Image: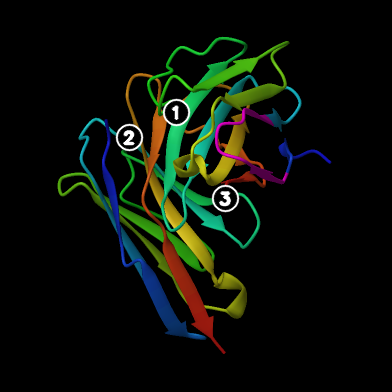
C-alpha cells in the first residue's frame, strides 16, 4: 500500500511498562508528525520531524515520551513507564515537504490502553 | 500556541439537508485552515482547505468560508448523504513551523 502505516494497531500494556509505537510514512515524504487523540478530543500535536531532525519537542507531554526517526523514513514513539492517562490513539502523519499547506496524510493510528 | 474551538460537538441532520460546522481560532497569524474527516477506525483525511487570502472555497457539496477579521471559519456540507456521517475536525496552522492545532471534532450523523 502507498499510505501511512502504523504498528501495532492495538496495544494493551500494564502501568509502568515501556511501549514502542511505529510509523512508516509514505515513501519520499520528508515531514513526519505524531499526534495523540484522546477519547472525544481533538488531535494533540506531539512532535514533528524534518528528515531525521525534530526541531520542536515542546508538544511531548512529559520526559517519559521520546521519538526518533532514522534514515528519513520510519519513526518510533516511545513511552516509558506508561501511566493510565497515556491511554489514547496515537496517530502518525506524513507530508511531502514541510511547508504550510502541504497535506498531511494520516495513518490509521495505534490504540494504546494502559491498565 | 493556537487555540481552536469547534462547534457543535454533535450534529444530526436529515439526509438531503445541509450541515454547518463552525470553528474559531486565536492566532491572527494563522494562514492555513484545513478540514479533516475521520471515519470509524481510520485516520483523519483531508477533505478541503482554505488559505488566508481566500474567503470561500467550494468542492462539489463541500464549501469552507473564512472570516479573518473575526477569526472564524466554517464547513458547509449540502445535500448530505449517509456516507457523510463521520467525525469532522477543523485545524489552523500556527508558529513559524506551521504546526496544526485541531478542534475537538464534530460527530455528524446523517439520518436516512
Position of A56 with respect to A115 (left or right) is left
Number of numbered discs on residues: 3
Horizontal and vertical percent position of residue B95: 32, 24
The answer to whether marks 3 and 2 sit on the same chain is yes
**Which circle, 3 or 2, is nearer the viewer?**
3
Residue in view at x 51 percent, y 23 percent:
A48
| Disc 2, SS | loop
The chain holding disc 1 is: A
Res B91 → quadrant: top left
Res B1 → quadrant: top left
Position of A54 with respect to B3 (left or right) is right
Residue in view at x 73 percent, y 31 percent:
A26
Q: Nearer the viewer, residue B79 or A84?
A: A84
Q: Which of B102 and A28 is in front in this view?
A: B102
Question: Is residue A18 on the magenta stretch?
Answer: yes
Question: Which residue in the structure is indicated by mark 2?
Answer: B31
Q: Which stretch did the figure color magenta?
A: A9-21
Q: Are marks 2 and 1 in contact (CB under 8 Å)?
A: yes
Question: Which residue in the structure is indicated by mark 3?
Answer: B44
The chain holding disc 2 is: B
Question: Which residue in the structure is indicated by mark 1?
Answer: A100
Amino acid at each position: 500500500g502507498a499510505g501511512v502505516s502504523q504498528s501495532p494497531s492495538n496495544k494493551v500494556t500494564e502501568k509502568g511498562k515501556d511501549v514502542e509505537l511505529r510509523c512508516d510514512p509514505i515513501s519520499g515524504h520528508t515531514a513526519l508528525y505524531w499526534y495523540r487523540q484522546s477519547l472525544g478530543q481533538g488531535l494533540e500535536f506531539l512532535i514533528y520531524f524534518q528528515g531525521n531532525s525534530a526541531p520542536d519537542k515542546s508538544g511531548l507531554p512529559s520526559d517519559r515520551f521520546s521519538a526518533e526517526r532514522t534514515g528519513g523514513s520510519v519513526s518510533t514513539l516511545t513511552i516509558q513507564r506508561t501511566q493510565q492517562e497515556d491511554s489514547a490513539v496515537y496517530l502518525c502523519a506524513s507530508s511531502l515537504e514541510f511547508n504550510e499547506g502541504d497535506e498531511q496524510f494520516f495513518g490509521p493510528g495505534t490504540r494504546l490502553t494502559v491498565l | 500556541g493556537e487555540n481552536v474551538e469547534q462547534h457543535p460537538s454533535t450534529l444530526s441532520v436529515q439526509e438531503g439537508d445541509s450541515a454547518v460546522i463552525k470553528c474559531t481560532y486565536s492566532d491572527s497569524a494563522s494562514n492555513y485552515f484545513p478540514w479533516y474527516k475521520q471515519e470509524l477506525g481510520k485516520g483523519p483525511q483531508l477533505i478541503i482547505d482554505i488559505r488566508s487570502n481566500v474567503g470561500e472555497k467550494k468542492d462539489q457539496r463541500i464549501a469552507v468560508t473564512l472570516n479573518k477579521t473575526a477569526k472564524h471559519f466554517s464547513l458547509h456540507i449540502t445535500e448530505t448523504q449517509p456516507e457523510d456521517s463521520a467525525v469532522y475536525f477543523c485545524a489552523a496552522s500556527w508558529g513559524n513551523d506551521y504546526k496544526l492545532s485541531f478542534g475537538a471534532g464534530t460527530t455528524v450523523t446523517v439520518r436516512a
